[in-house]
Image (cartoon, rainbow, N blue to C red):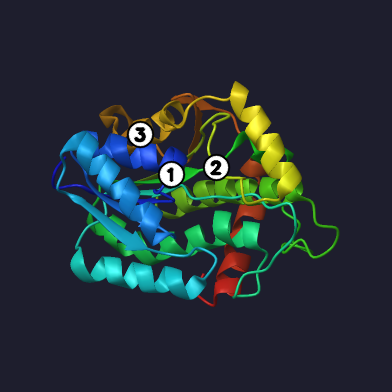
Amino acid sequence: MSDKTCLVTGASSGIGKETALGLARLGFSVVLACRNRERGHAALDYIRQKTGSSALELIMVDLADLGSVRRMAAEYLETRDRTDVLVNNAGLILTKRSVTVDGFETTFQVNYLSHFLLTRLLLDSLKRSAPSRIINVSSGAHTSGHIRFDDLQCARGYNAFKAYGQSKLAQVLFTYELSRRTSGKRVDVNCLHPGAVATNWGRGGGDWLSFGLRLASVFEMSPQRGAETSLFLASDPRLEGVSGKYFTNKKETESSAESHDIDEARRLWDESCRLLGIQA
């Protein structure tokens, strides 16, 4: 695997860090895409110590800033002629509504829209590297989510879990639509529910949410276990040619009825491109 390159977003902690660690153990060249430089370097050193790998690199990106996403993609492509695996892992949940520097609701942009943009920017590289894989870390919370085209930015009556569910449903719809659009290109696109995992993904969400998530973490699985399905989708040779699927516990499972709405997926794709100012 030493000639195969994998990019993992949100790789400084939690599932992303464990995914990067697992890929390094498998011999991938791994690029850790992180927002915080100090935590990113700490994760890089940790993985290097655990694996002895020299094929590790840190690249900085703030998913709450589309300019940062574009700069990171350009920097990445400047020095690499291939992308074998892209793991869109980073995510958050926020108690109070906030908007990014781009004017979009933060949960929607960080969890979905920036990953949509990043994937589009790297898609030619993924096609050149085929067979390649795109993995979107969604959540079982997508089943309670709905795409509110009249209020995608949750400006009316913000609710943390509704915003989070919408962003995770958007990831699943994006997975299925991208799989249809890359059919025959040998770029496999799948998504997953990692399980209830004890990570810090909601720790910045506000006092009550942070407390509730810390309390719930007693009953959650470790990030190591949570990363197992991402690693399975990234590396298992039996999955070559498997695309447009939703996985839980390393098994293909059924996603929500709304996630299979082809018209909704196309509409979301077109609207995402409009918001980003890119060609559909």
Q: Is the C-beta separation of discs 1 and 3 under 8 Å?
A: no
> Which residue corresponds to mark 1?
13
Instruction: Give x and y (percent) for residue 120.
Output: 42, 63
Task: Sort mark 1 into few (<14), some (14-19) or many (20+) by Cα contacts within 10 Å.
Answer: many
Residue 79, picture quadrant: bottom left
At 41% from the left and 43% from the top, the residue drawn is: 16
Viewport quadrant of the N terminus? top left
- x, y percent for residue 174: 54, 52
Residue lying at 64% horizontally and 34% vertically, measured from the top left: 214
Do the numbered discs 2 and 1 sit on residues whose CB atoms are within 8 Å? yes
Identified by mark 3, the residue type is: Leu
Q: Which residue is mark 3?
A: 231
| Residue placed most toward the observer, 192 or 53 | 53
State which tag comes first along the sequence, 1 or 3.
Answer: 1
* Helix, strand or loop at mark 1: loop
- Which is nearer the N-term, disc 2 or disc 1? 1
